[in-house]
Image: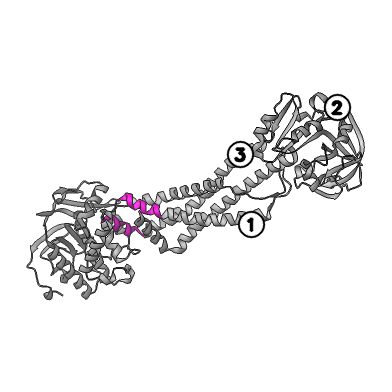
């Protein structure tokens, strides 16, 4: 089943009189359960494409479908509704709210979808357990390592059981060990829950985890290949 | 909602000093306004109390034709057998004291100096005249039988260089329209700490004033003090007989009441100015918070938080700043009012025609002023939070995510 479909999407940024074409007619379909890497050099359009799929930005032309629904021209509130509960995000920087504990950060999306206290407690506890941070639940982000923070971000992205998780350079700010841990967590959750992961990266060690690699160059899809899933022991 | 306030509280805690000083700005503004409101109320209430105590009483009984502005001494404009009328009124249960008074215009002359005065012919023993007796500064108070003594205010004595025992000449209008002049000896000098009254009022015993002005057995008014001010209307209604007119303190002190209303209207303007200034501090704090937390706003938006909720989060912060500032302001304000209510606030000789303002104001904070100011402060602070809240809510998630570091 198609989770997202991109049709002839372009995105032009204007800075004064200067126009920059970040995407130049991209076509892409992501199926349910995929573990896909968007790769390419800086400025190739990876992040812009992720933002299109994530309803954070809108295309200049073309169409974006999420679960079969055209989201290209939704207003701000409709896009927020679409993101909430359908799409989870993991960012390059450790995007946690610094005043909230790990537990509260994971709980936030559940509050936004109006889940009851008991359900929230059960879900957050299980998610923190699944990313190996049960004992760090009540620590604030500044009391966690970079790797731990990114794992909390993964748990938060999964909180509302979304159909799609988008990760923008999830290991870019991590050392090798922590980066590996994060990727293994993502791979395991993809296999266990069947949630679709699309992540942007230019780190070859991370690309090895992907089952499909989409290469972008200058706003175009230059290559679109499916790889055999390697075992975790072979990575790194 | 609780979560929202929890987050807002923690966000304010990120920069405790800045949040504290923002609240303190509101607290300072509010406390000064509370003091100001208490000062105005104390001043107006004090002026009203002084006027009632010294000049108007709670009501006065006068002849139907008596014109206060002309200080008429014609018999038909006066109350006949005033002592008898006063005794009847004093017999009413709510009445504390009722006493006749005769008013006349006069001129005090000493050596080559003169001063225009208002002559009060009073019954020195009446309880209603206790404020004059208690204000004795030097010499003696009047006695009913005294035929040569006069009791004058301290500012007048100082102005004319007079002391107890000195002689003065007093000219007064008489009932038949002439002017009569007689020498008097200063028996005593008084102060009621009300410059406007003390500088222009001299006292004679009623009998002597009646002789001087040829008013015989007449008085300008029966001055009535009640046990409770609230009983004025019922007593006034009971005394309306047709022969005399009854004038209540509210009618006699319209100027004071109007002045208080005017002062209150200006106070609202002052509230808005002062709280408007403190609101800019709150706006500044929250705008800084919005820019510092741009990326967090982007994160919250990316996980599906709607603009409305982001706005509510910042409004929750401004309402917490408001609550903190208001609590501090109330404590500070009440402490300041309490201090000045005890020590008094010396304002010197304030002379406003038609109003008797004491030289010391004792601030009085009313519940009405406190509640009104608290509500205005809260609303203005919330309104101040509106701009940063809208600013945060309108951020495009992708821009916000890019904006932070």
Q: Earlier in the sequence, mark 1 or mark 3?
A: 3
Relative image position of residue B393 (x, y in whole percent) = 34, 51
- Front: mark 2 or 3: 2
Q: What is the spatial separation of the Cα atoms under label 2 and label 3, in whole angstroms? A: 39 Å
Element type where label 1 sits in the image:
helix
User: Left or right: where does residue A194 sit relative to residue B25?
Assistant: left
Subunit under mark 2:
B
Relative image position of residue B182 (x, y in whole percent) = 92, 36
The N terminus of chain A sits in image quarter: bottom left
Q: Residue at x 19, y 60 (%)?
A: A166
Characterize the local packing of mark 3: few (<14), some (14-19) or many (20 or more) Cα atoms within 10 angstroms.
few
Element type where label 3 sits in the image:
helix
- In the image, are marks 2 and 1 on the same chain? yes
One can see residue A203 in this view: no
Q: What is the spatial separation of the Cα atoms under label 2 and label 1, in whole angstroms? A: 51 Å
Characterize the local packing of mark 2: few (<14), some (14-19) or many (20 or more) Cα atoms within 10 angstroms.
many
Q: Which residue range is magenta in the image?
A: B293-316
- Mark 2 and mark 3 residues within 8 Å of each other at the beta carbon: no
A27 over B69 or under it: above or below: below
- Nearest the viewer among A22 and B110 is B110
Subunit under mark 3:
B
B339 over B153 or under it: above or below: below
User: Left or right: where does residue A109 sit relative to residue B70?
Assistant: left
Subunit under mark 1:
B
Characterize the local packing of mark 1: few (<14), some (14-19) or many (20 or more) Cα atoms within 10 angstroms.
some
Q: Which residue is mark 2?
A: B175
The label shown at residue B262 is 3
Q: Which residue is mark 1?
A: B339
Instruction: State the image quarter where residue B229 is shown.
Output: top right
Q: What is the spatial separation of the Cα atoms under label 1 and label 3, in whole angstroms? A: 26 Å
- Nearest the viewer among B56 and B263 is B56
B262 over A214 or under it: above or below: above
């Amino acid at each position: 089943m198609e989770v997202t479909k991109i049709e002839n999407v372009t995105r032009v940024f204007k800075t004064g009189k200067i126009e920059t074409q970040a995407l130049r007619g991209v076509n892409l379909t992501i199926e349910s359960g995929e573990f896909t890497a968007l790769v390419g050099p800086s400025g190739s359009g990876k992040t812009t494409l992720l933002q299109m799929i994530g309803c954070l930005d809108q295309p200049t032309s073309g169409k974006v479908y999420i679960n079969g629904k055209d989201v290209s021209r939704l207003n701000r509130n409709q896009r927020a509704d679409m993101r909430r509960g359908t799409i989870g995000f993991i960012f390059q920087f450790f995007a946690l709210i610094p005043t909230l504990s790990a537990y509260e950060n994971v709980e936030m999306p559940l509050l936004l979808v109006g889940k009851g206290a008991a359900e929230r407690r059960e879900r957050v506890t299980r998610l923190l357990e699944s990313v190996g941070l049960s004992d760090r639940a009540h620590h604030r982000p500044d009391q966690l390592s970079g790797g731990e923070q990114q794992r909390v971000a993964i748990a938060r992205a999964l909180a509302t059981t979304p159909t799609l998780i988008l990760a923008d350079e999830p290991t870019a700010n991590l050392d090798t060990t922590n980066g590996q841990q994060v990727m293994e967590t993502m791979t395991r959750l993809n296999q266990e829950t069947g949630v679709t992961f699309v992540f942007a990266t230019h780190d070859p060690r991370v690309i090895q985890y992907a089952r499909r690699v989409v290469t972008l160059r200058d706003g175009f899809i230059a290559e679109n290949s499916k790889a055999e899933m390697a075992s975790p022991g072979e990575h790194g | 909602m609780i979560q929202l306030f929890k987050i807002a509280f923690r966000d304010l805690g990120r920069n405790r000093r800045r949040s504290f000083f923002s609240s303190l700005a509101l607290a300072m503004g509010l406390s000064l306004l509370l003091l100001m409101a208490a000062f105005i109320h104390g001043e107006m209430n004090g002026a009203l109390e002084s006027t009632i105590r010294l000049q108007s009483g709670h009501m006065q009984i006068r002849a139907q034709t008596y014109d206060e502005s002309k200080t008429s001494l014609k018999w038909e404009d006066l109350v006949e057998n005033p002592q008898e009328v006063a005794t009847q009124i004093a017999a009413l249960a709510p009445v504390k004291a009722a006493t006749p008074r005769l008013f006349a215009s006069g001129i005090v002359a000493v050596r080559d100096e003169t001063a225009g005065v208002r002559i009060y012919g009073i019954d020195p023993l009446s309880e209603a005249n206790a404020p004059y007796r208690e204000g004795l500064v030097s010499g003696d108070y009047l006695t009913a039988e005294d035929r040569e003594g006069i009791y004058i205010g301290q500012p007048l004595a100082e102005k004319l260089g007079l002391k107890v025992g000195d002689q003065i000449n007093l000219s007064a209008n008489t009932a038949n329209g002439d002017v009569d002049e007689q020498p008097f000896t200063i028996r005593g000098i008084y102060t009621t700490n009300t410059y406007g009254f003390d500088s222009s009022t001299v006292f004679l015993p009623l009998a002597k004033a009646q002789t001087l002005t040829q008013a015989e057995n007449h008085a300008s008014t029966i001055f009535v003090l009640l046990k409770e001010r609230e009983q004025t209307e019922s007593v006034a209604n009971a005394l309306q007989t047709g022969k005399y007119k009854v004038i209540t303190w509210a009618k006699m002190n319209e100027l004071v009441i109007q002045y208080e209303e005017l002062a209150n209207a200006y106070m609202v303007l002052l509230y808005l100015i002062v709280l408007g200034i403190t609101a800019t501090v709150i706006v500044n704090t929250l705008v800084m918070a919005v820019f510092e937390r741009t990326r967090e706003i982007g994160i919250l938006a990316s996980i599906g938080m709607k603009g409305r909720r982001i706005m509510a989060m910042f409004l929750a912060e401004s309402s917490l700043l408001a609550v903190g500032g208001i609590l501090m302001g109330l404590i500070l304000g009440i402490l300041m009012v309490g201090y000045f209510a005890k020590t008094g606030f010396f304002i010197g000789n304030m002379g406003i025609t038609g109003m008797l303002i004491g030289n010391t104001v004792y601030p009085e904070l009313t519940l009405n002023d406190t509640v009104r100011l608290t509500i205005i402060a809260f609303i203005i602070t919330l309104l101040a939070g509106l701009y940063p809240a809208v600013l945060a809510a309108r951020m495009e998630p992708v821009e916000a995510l890019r904006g932070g570091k």
